Image (cartoon, rainbow, N blue to C red):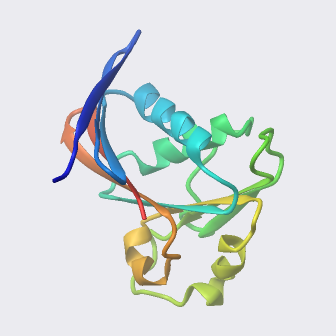
Amino acid sequence: MRYVVYSAIVGTEGVICKIFTMNSEELVSESVEDTQRIAKDLIQSLSEGTVVALIGDLGSGKTTFSQGIGKALGIKRHLQSPTFTIMKEYHELKHEKFSSLYHIDLYRLESPIDLPTLGIDEVMSDPHGLVIIEWAEKVKSQLPEKRIEITFEHVDEGKRKISIQHC
């Protein structure tokens, strides 16, 4: 038997619905602010050395979510997707758990690559870092078994379903 628990967070922007199962939860975001708040809330439950795999179509909320993580970690400058550079590192974090954030964007990759070639295996093993990988589905077989996998889906204009799976 699988138990499902429903709850809702009521804020000034509306209601964020949550659906919890054993190792996953589904949330509905109705704005950029909702998506960034979900990212900020997630940070509280993560441990050092976590890899967060972001999966979803173009414009589904992956970068907005990453920006929410950056804000939650105290990064002052605007966090942009490293689409052309593949990876950006941030070391000026103001957070008790994480000393580094590694933001990886694999959108431009046309075929699966070997992550060690890019040095990504090294950052994924940083015991005090947090690694965010946009377009992680392109290298899913190379990701660590223990990770957080977040899938973003368009529901309608401005509304997204965010599914968080603890692998």
The quadrant holding residue 165 is bottom left
Query: Horizontal and vertical percent for residue 48?
Result: 70, 56
Query: Horizontal and vertical percent for residue 83?
Result: 53, 63
Query: Horizontal and vertical percent for residue 134?
Result: 47, 61
Q: How many marks?
A: 0
The quadrant holding residue 26 is top left
Query: Horizontal and vertical percent for residue 166?
Result: 43, 58
Say left or right for 100 vs 52.
right
In terms of depth relative to the viewer, which is nearer, 41 or 4?
4
Q: Is residue 11 visible?
A: yes
Q: Is residue 163 visible?
A: no
Quadrant housing the C terminus: bottom left
Residue at image position (49%, 71%) is 106
Q: Residue furthest front?
A: 1
Residue at image position (72%, 79%) is 122
In terms of depth relative to the viewer, which is nearer, 145 or 153?
145
Query: Where 14 falls versus 39 (above or below)?
Result: above
Q: Residue furthest right?
A: 92
In terms of depth relative to the viewer, which is nearer, 30 or 20?
20
Q: Residue furthest top?
A: 12
Query: Where 101 falls versus 137 (above or below)?
Result: above
Residue at image position (65%, 35%) is 71
Query: Where 158 falls versus 56 (above or below)?
Result: above
Query: Where 106 falls versus 27 (above or below)?
Result: below
